[in-house]
Amino acid sequence: MSNQGITPRQKLVIEAGRTEQQYWKDLWRYRELFYFLAWRDILVRYKQTVIGIAWALIRPFLTMIVFTVVFGNLAKLPSEGAPYPILVFAAMLPWQFFSSALSECSNSLISNANLVSKVYFPRLVVPTSAVIVSFVDFMVSVIILLGLMAWYDFMPGWRFLTLPLFIIIAFAASMGAGLWLAALNVEYRDFRYIVPFIVQFGLYISPVGFSSSIVPEQWRLIYSLNPMVGVIDGFRWAILGGESRLYLPGFFLSLGLVMLLFTTGIWYFRKMERKFADVI
């Protein structure tokens, strides 16, 4: 029997990494996978819940009520000329987005272990799709803000038009921190227990339930070493207008730290990406 026409068995090679130029092109080529992962996670989150996507409204709304009672009614902290619930919720929007993105990103590679270990695609697709899921919750929560403004007959000024800029900054902060935690969680599984602590601790050291203006002047720049301080202050400046003031030295410090977090997050994720398939 002749062996003519029989070719050697071909091998499928899953590449551990690509050149930077090819890698970013691959991100565009695999955009349909990105859409699929994001849409799948959105459906899974609310598929078997009784009230569905309303959970994205209930969580920040209840937190707002607690902070309003504690800091606004009992502690009588200043509200920058706006109703205290709006002051709180203007900060809850970026914080809820950031904290949700951290939780989703940190577990994104582990929860997609079968996909990561068997098929080549830019792994950056996975945590990015997780951030998009959190962004959907963010957009849903904007409904509460609009409802509060209507309830208190509160009209934002021209600064509201700058809000997309601060949304981009919040997205960069969420993405940068999320990439660090996603990569670290693959290498060190202890981070699955550390992330909830980071989220809980960060809520209390960030100006969510109160205005950062109550921080003494000599400490405000140091306080702005928390990147979310600048993000939250930016949201309040854009939404509240009026008496709200943006502490520029602290804002630019926070902005610089967000950019550093974002760029180093991508760098570290790309550095560790070659090992993901083996470690997972």
Image (spheres, helix red, strand yellow):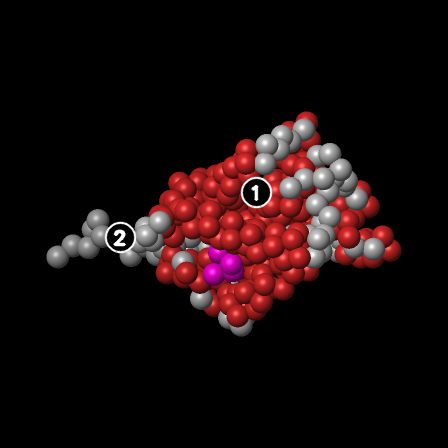
Q: Quadrant of residue 197?
A: bottom right
Magenta span main SS: helix
What residue do we see at 51% from left, 67% from top? 192
Considering the image in quadrants, where does the C terminus appear? bottom left
User: As shown in the figure, which amino acid type bears the numbered disc 2?
Assistant: Thr
Location of residue 121 in the rendering, given as x and y in whole percent from the top left corner? 44, 50
- Judging by the rendered image, the residue that carries numbered circle 2 is 7
Location of residue 248 in the rendering, given as x and y in whole percent from the top left corner? 80, 42
Q: How many marks?
A: 2
What residue do we see at 44% from left, 63% from top? 110
Q: Residues within 10 Å of mark 1 (few under 14, many from 20)?
A: few
> From where the camera sits, is residue 268 visible?
no
Residue with the most extreme bottom position? 190
Location of residue 26 in the rendering, given as x and y in whole percent from the top left corner? 48, 43
Q: Secondary structure at mark 2?
A: loop
Q: Which mark is residue 102?
A: none
**Between 71 and 225, the one nearer to me in the picture:** 71
> From where the camera sits, is residue 28 visible?
yes
Location of residue 107 in the rendering, given as x and y in whole percent from the top left corner? 47, 61
**Between 111 and 61, the one nearer to me in the picture:** 61
- Judging by the rendered image, the residue that carries numbered circle 1 is 21
What residue do we see at 72% from left, 52% from top? 77
Residue with the most extreme right position? 218
What residue do we see at 61% from left, 42% from top? 86
Of labels 2 and 1, the one closer to you: 1
What is the magenta range?
Answer: 103-107
Q: Check if residue 104 falls in the magenta segment.
A: yes
User: Is residue 129 shown above or below 206?
Assistant: above
Q: CA distance from mark 2 to mark 1?
A: 34 Å
Residue with the most extreme top position? 158
User: As shown in the figure, which amino acid type bears the numbered disc 1?
Assistant: Gln
Q: Check if residue 33 falls in the magenta segment.
A: no
